[in-house]
């Protein structure tokens, strides 16, 4: 048997169907027939408004993938533009601030250890005795 080459319009239609996956679902459900879809495609063309409803998922996936790559490129660009010395300086400032806050908590007795010891009842600011 000699292999037959398919007509160019059939190849184009196959590519069109790959880009519009909901068309396959419509045909499988029995709502449309391939002949009808092919004739509409041939007469209306690929860019007609009719086909948008069959392509929504595909476009949304492409837009989501594009947004992800945009975010990643923005993050990489931000990392490239960072000055290591400035980042180190900010980290040092944050560390000093946290140490100062911890010192204040210790000074005013707000640390975990002082709460536990005061809850035991061993330390009272005023000592009262029963008469």
Image: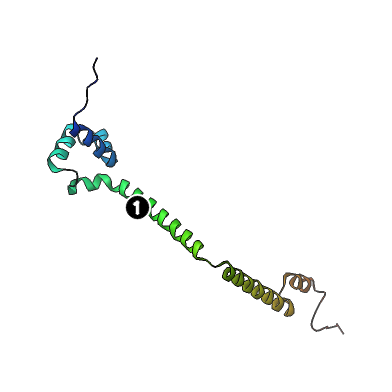
Residue 93 horizontal/vertical position (percent): 62, 74
- In the picture, measured across the screen, residue 42 lies left or right of residue 115, that is left
In-front residue for pair 13/49: 13
Residue 131 horizontal/vertical position (percent): 87, 85
Q: Residue at x 31, y 46 (%)?
A: 58
- In the picture, measured across the screen, residue 82 lies left or right of residue 17, that is right
The scheme the figure's colours follow is rainbow
In-front residue for pair 130/110: 110
Residue 119 vertical position relative to residue 36 in the rendered view, above or below: below
Toward the top, the furthest residue is: 1
- In the picture, measured across the screen, residue 108 lies left or right of residue 86, that is right
- Please identify the quarter of the rendering in which residue 102 is found: bottom right
Q: Residue at x 61, y 69 (%)?
A: 88
Number of numbered markers? 1
Q: Is residue 33 visible?
A: no
- Please identify the quarter of the rendering in which residue 120 is found: bottom right
What secondary structure is marked by label 1? helix
Q: Is residue 41 visible?
A: yes
Residue 101 horizontal/vertical position (percent): 67, 76
- In the picture, measured across the screen, residue 118 lies left or right of residue 27, that is right
In-front residue for pair 58/87: 87
In which quadrant will I find the N terminus? top left
Toward the right, the furthest residue is: 131
The crowding category of the residue bearing disc 1, from other C-alpha atoms within 10 Å (few below 14, some 14 to 19, many at least 20), is few
Residue 82 vertical position relative to residue 72 in the rendered view, above or below: below
Residue 62 vertical position relative to residue 106 in the rendered view, above or below: above
Residue receiving disc 1:
63
């Amino acid at each position: 048997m000699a292999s037959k080459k398919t007509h160019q319009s059939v190849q184009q239609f196959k590519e069109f169907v790959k880009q519009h996956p909901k068309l396959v679902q419509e045909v499988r459900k029995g709502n449309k027939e391939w002949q009808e879809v092919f004739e509409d495609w041939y007469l209306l063309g690929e860019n007609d408004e009719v086909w948008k409803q069959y392509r929504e998922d595909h476009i949304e996936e492409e837009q989501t993938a594009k947004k992800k790559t945009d975010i990643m490129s923005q993050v990489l660009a931000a990392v490239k533009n960072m000055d290591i010395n400035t980042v180190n300086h900010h980290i040092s400032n944050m560390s000093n601030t946290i140490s100062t806050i911890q010192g204040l908590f210790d000074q005013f007795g707000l640390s975990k250890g002082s709460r536990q010891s005061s809850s035991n009842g061993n330390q009272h600011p005023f000592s009262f005795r029963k008469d």
